[in-house]
Image: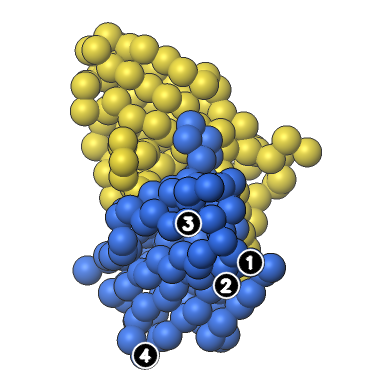
Chain colours: A yellow, B blue
Amino acid sequence: NAGVTQTPKFRILKIGQSMTLQCTQDMNHNYMYWYRQDPGMGLKLIYYSVGAGITDKGEVPNGYNVSRSTTEDFPLRLELAAPSQTSVYFCAAHRGRLSTDTQYFGPGTRLTVL
Amino acid sequence: GENVEQHPSTLSVQEGDSAVIKCTYSDSASNYFPWYKQELGKRPQLIIDIRSNVGEKKDQRIAVTLNKTAKHFSLHITETQPEDSAVYFCAATYRLSSNTGKLIFGQGTTLQVKP
C-alpha cells in the first residue's frame, strides 16, 4: 500500500512549455485534491475531485486543468507554463467526508519555470 | 470569507519547554481542524486533529484545544525536543458542496527547538 504517489519529484520548465503532474493513490479513496505551496506559505487548493468523472475548481485554478477518468489517478495539466507557477505541488486524497476521514498527502513535485 | 489566521509565524523555545501555536477561523460551520507538521523538503504529515464535538484531544506530548464559540483552536507541544523543529500548519474545513469540503490552511509557524 503506497498511499499517494506523485511523479516527477522535480522538473524545470521553460516559459510556454506544458507538462502533466501525475498523482496516483491505491487506497480507493473517492476524494482527491491538488494544492500548490509557494515558499514560506501554506497550501492553496487548485482543483479537487469527489470521484471518477467529477472535478471542480478550487481557490487558484487559473493556468491548470485536471481530469479524473479513474478512481486511482488525478493528473494536473499545465498548458502554458509561467514563472508564477513555480511552486511545490501536492496531491492529497481522503476516503469520505473531511469531518470524519484523514487527508493524506503525496510527496510533492517541485516545479521551476524559467 | 474563508480565512485561517495562524500565530506566531516563528517560535523559538529551549529544549524541554512548551510551545503553543494558535489559529482562528472565520466559518462557524467548520467542523474539522487538523494540524500538520512539515519538515524541510517533505510532505505535510498529520500529527493530530480535532472534530467539533470535542474540546480537547491529547496524544502523548501533543494536545489540541478547540473553542467553537470564539472560533479558535490551539496546538500545545510539551517537553519539546530538537526533532520537533519544523513548520506547523493548522487547517479548518470549509464546505465545497453537499458532500465534500476543503481544507483552508494557516500561514504556518516555524518552530525551532534549541538544544
Callout 4 amino acid:
Thr
Which chain is indicated by disc 3?
Answer: B
State the residue in front, B82 or B69. Answer: B82
Spatial CA distance of label 4 from label 1 is 26 Å
Q: Which residue is mark 2?
A: B63
> Of marks 4 and 3, which one's residue comes earlier in the chain?
3
Above-or-below relation of A36 to B78: above
Residue drawn at (22%, 21%), measured in percent from left and top? A82
Q: Which residue is mark 4?
A: B69
Q: Position of residue B12 (x, y in %)?
A: 39, 54
Callout 3 amino acid:
Gln
Q: Position of residue B4 (x, y in %)?
A: 31, 65
Q: Does mark 2 fall on the same chain as mark 4?
A: yes
Image depth: mark 4 or mark 1 in front: 1
Check contact, mark 4 vs mark 2: CB within 8 A.
Answer: no
Q: Which residue is mark 3?
A: B14
Above-or-below relation of A107 to B10: above
Residue sticking out furthest to the bottom:
B69
Spatial CA distance of label 3 from label 1 is 15 Å
Q: Is residue B70 left or right of residue B15?
A: left
Q: Which residue is mark 1?
A: B61
Spatial CA distance of label 2 from label 1 is 7 Å
Q: Does mark 1 fall on the same chain as mark 3?
A: yes
Q: Quadrant of residue B7?
A: bottom left
Residue drawn at (64%, 56%), measured in percent from left and top? A95
Spatial CA distance of label 2 from label 3 is 19 Å
